[in-house]
Amino acid sequence: ASSAKYLTGDGTAIKEFLDKFDTFLFDCDGVLWSGDHVFDGVPETLLLLRSKGKRIVFVTNNSTKTRQDYVEKLAGMGIEAGADDVFGSSYSAAVYIARILQLPPGKDKVFVIGEAGVERELAAEGVPFLGGTDPAFRRDITPADFAGLADGSLLDPAVGAVLCGLDFHVNYLKLAHGLHYLRRGARFLATNTDSTLPMHRDLFLGAGSCSAPLVGAVGEQPLSLGKPSQAMMDAVEGKFRLDRARTCMVGDRLNTDIKFGVDGKLGGTLHVLTGVNSKADWEAENAVAVPSFYADKLSDLRDCE
Ligand code: PLP
Ligand code: CA
């Protein structure tokens, strides 16, 4: 299945690659940086792309942060961006709920399993919510909770959706609330469903591992608003008026970034080998997605002259 073109050393191939696209969608972690360490030459590479008139959008599945948090993180790494240049999965979910799902009045609250990034993007879109970081949900479940959840007396009748992101304080009490809202007909949404989260050159539990207990309990998958979900691609397209044929998705992960671009029928996808997946992963027989281009690292694109 290895049809990806290798972008290296040869300036002509890189120039041809750049000429194909007007817009680059950049995954962040694993492409621009790893954790808090920006990769060498990345700010300069982005400046070079911008100097060639390319539009750059940062598309991240990290739901724990807001777009503004990303602006600050990018600035700290020497990359200039505004909130409108960032599209995160918590923003994607908030926009979807506020503008597309449009829950009916009286049923328009969202029960959140997630961190402050989700809450702040919901608030910015005017979506009422409960759960999330509220300390009232950070405790052990009691016999009274079981009874109140079963008879509904502990449930807010205005909840029309359950939204799951990565929650570092996920617990039985929150999951039980989520389950009982879902059993009463709430829509099941997720900021993203990455099973794992890369940190410290290892893997931890991702947002998908926080929604997994509910998936098991209700036997239904959430609608994901993060990569590779095409609900996110549609939202990105709507916001940035993308010409998909002239857009390239750049990422380190096959089952989120590259699948996102391939399923979205973008003009191209670029796999950089500085993150989660290796070349062998898309060369394998059962690869989840195969990129159209690959490079050892993003800064190799500077060799275009
Ligand atoms: N979710 C969380 C909480 C993260 O911290 C990260 C990476 O930092 C991700 C998801 C993956 O983000 P990205 O899509 O930028 O690789
Ligand atoms: Ca990534």
Image (tube, grey):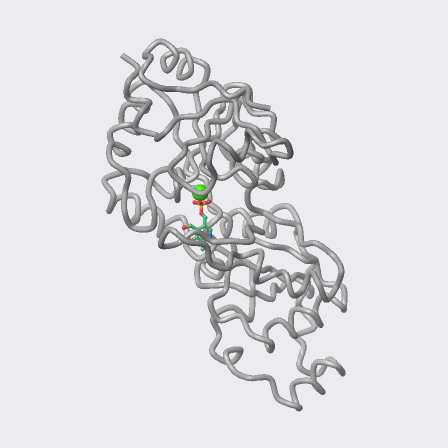
Tell me: 39 left or right of 136.
left
Q: What residue is drawn where x is 41% and y is 13%?
A: 19
Give the x, y percent position of residue 234. 60, 35
Please tell me which residue lies in front, 147 or 104. 147
Image point (72%, 66%), residue name: 217
- Which residue is at the front of the view, 248 or 197? 197
In this view, the residue in front, 34 or 214, is: 34
Residue at x 68%, y 56% (from the top left corner): 103
Residue at the outermost bottom position: 143
Q: Residue at x 28, y 33 (%)?
A: 42
Tell me residue 287's x, y (percent).
60, 34
Q: Is residue 179 above or below residue 270?
A: below
Image location of residue 272, percent across then percent down = 41, 32
Image x and y of residue 49, in percent = 32, 23
Q: How many marks?
A: 0
Spot the residue most to the top.
12
Locate the N terminus by quadrant.
top right
Q: Nearer the viewer, residue 216 or 8?
A: 8
Q: In which quadrant will I find the C terminus? A: top left
**Is 249 above or below relative to 32?**
above
Left or right of residue 32: residue 150? right
